Amino acid sequence: MSKRKVAARLWAAYFLTVLSLFGVQCLAQAETAKNSIRVAVATNFVTTLKTLSEDFASLDNSKILISAGSTGKLYAQIRQGAPYDIFLAADQQRPQLLEQHGLTVTNSRFTYANGALVLWRPNRVRGFTTKGEESQTGQRAQIRQWLAGASSIALANSRLAPYGFAAEEVLHNLKITKSVSQRRVTGENIGQTFSLVATGNATLGFVAAAQILELSQPVATYLTIPRELHSPILQDAVQLKFGVNNQAAARFMQYLKSTRAKKIIQKAGFLAAKTTQSTNLGP
């Protein structure tokens, strides 16, 4: 056999090997894509979602890919065609708007959590009285006292973040007006707002109860805001049109309604809102 024919056969074998490996790689990538769930999640629920993802992984071999941000910004991204399968918002309004624009899977929306708002001041903050404070004044008076004594107050952007809107309602309902010497520091989302207080860029701030529990903050450093002072922070989940054929995404949506998922959500500092149907996926 001539050297030319040998070389041709070697190149053909090499080409077939490369083609075969490429085919295997493509199949692996397709399988990974099929088992991936792209979730756009509000900042206040990121840590809880990670815990839920770990628990879900014990039941399902799917992988959850998390993209976090303010509800308003994530909503804008979805409207512009961002490739998410599921949207876990911090409100009900944006998922409802996505429904109206035909960008969701029919009848997939439900309320998965009810957020709790707290007023937080770190331990290092001085100028506050803590001993016997609760017994001497009512809860609302306490909140007013903390706010009045703060040189700066942090809250999330009310146009983008439902927790920020709730904080504005609290200030309005308590008739708290900004003094000449007091600053209002605005975070893009509840995560950024928490950071503003934690780093000392604000004396205190309105943050999510879940954040406080996550970092095991002392009880003396925060006040739970009475729910009658603001609208309920009901958080809706919805499966998006982009993920209409993603069975893994549908399974995760079903999991979020389960008793075991609700227990995780409640433990994280949220109230697990009632859904139209609940499934029991184990203890």
Image (cartoon, rainbow, N blue to C red):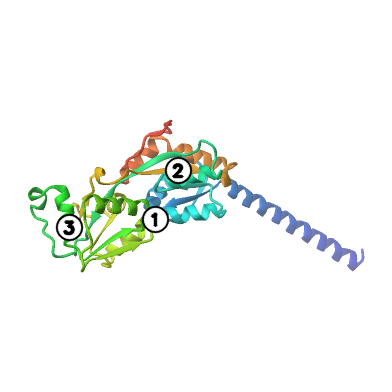
Q: Is residue 13 visible?
A: yes
The amino acid beneath tag 1 is Arg
Task: Give yes or no for contact between labels 1 and 3 (Cβ–Cβ under 8 Å).
Answer: no
Residue at 21% of width from left, 68% of height from top? 180
Judging from the image, what secondary structure is the residue with disc 1 in? loop
On the image, the x and y values in percent for residue 179 come to: 20, 64
The amino acid beneath tag 2 is Ala
What residue is disc 1 on? 159
Judging from the image, what secondary structure is the residue with disc 3 in? helix
Task: Give yes or no for contact between labels 2 and 1 (Cβ–Cβ under 8 Å).
Answer: no
How far apart, in angstroms, are the residues tagged by discs 2 and 3? Answer: 34 Å
Q: Nearer the viewer, residue 192 or 152?
A: 152
What residue is disc 2 on? 237
Does residue 256 lie above or below 153 as drawn? Answer: above
Residue at 19% of width from left, 52% of height from top? 219
Q: Nearer the viewer, residue 241 or 264?
A: 241
On the image, the x and y values in percent for residue 86 come to: 50, 46
In the image, taking residue 146 as reference, residue 187 lies left or right, namely right
What residue is disc 3 on? 146
Question: Which image quarter is the C terminus in?
Answer: top left
Sort mark 1 into few (<14), some (14-19) or many (20+) by Cα contacts within 10 Å.
some
Q: Nearer the viewer, mark 2 or mark 1?
A: 1
Of the image marks 2 and 1, the number of the one nearer the N terminus: 1
